[in-house]
Image (cartoon, rainbow, N blue to C red):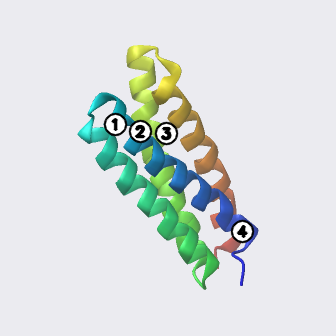
Amino acid sequence: MAPPGSAHPAFGLGALTIAGGIAGYIRKNSKASLGAGVVCGSLLIASGVMISGDSQYGGHSLAAGTSGLMALGMGHRFFKTGKFMPSGLVGVLGAASLAYHVNKALEWKD
């Protein structure tokens, strides 16, 4: 059975976040990028699994929280350095994901 459409953004951003963390480690030997990418990406993928199951509200809430942390952390880094790549891009993606998942969580709230 295919996952519902609302789980796809969590799966996609999760995979992209893990890939970005690995790329940061390979290119700059950044263990922080690797750790943050794997942890945040794994949480987003876990939220997609929850959304695909019977916990849509919990899955969207987890995705919103993770996305919010990404948006805050990388947005702060972007404003500090002024470099759009990668911090600005991750901050924008995190903010967009936060808005989407908060909206979906409110739809599923009992």
Residue 48 location, quadrant: bottom right
Between the residue at mark 2 and the residue at mark 3, the CA separation in whole angstroms equals: 19 Å
The mark that comes first in sequence, 4 or 1, is: 1
Q: Position of residue 90 (x, y in %)?
A: 51, 36
Please name whichever residue, 54 or 3, is drawn nearer the observer in this view of the structure. 3
**Residue highlighted by disc 4:** 107
The mark that comes first in sequence, 4 or 3, is: 3
Describe the element under mark 4 as helix, strand or loop: helix
The reply to whether callout 4 and callout 1 are in contact (CB within 8 Å) is: no
Q: Position of residue 55 (x, y in %)?
A: 57, 80
Please name whichever residue, 67 or 1, is drawn nearer the observer in this view of the structure. 1
- Which of pointers 4 and 1 indicates the residue nearer the eye? 1
Q: Which mark is residue 26?
A: 1
The mark that comes first in sequence, 1 or 3, is: 1
> How crowded is the residue under tag 3: few (<14 C-alpha within 10 Å), some, or many (20+)?
many
**Residue highlighted by disc 3:** 71
**Residue highlighted by disc 2:** 23
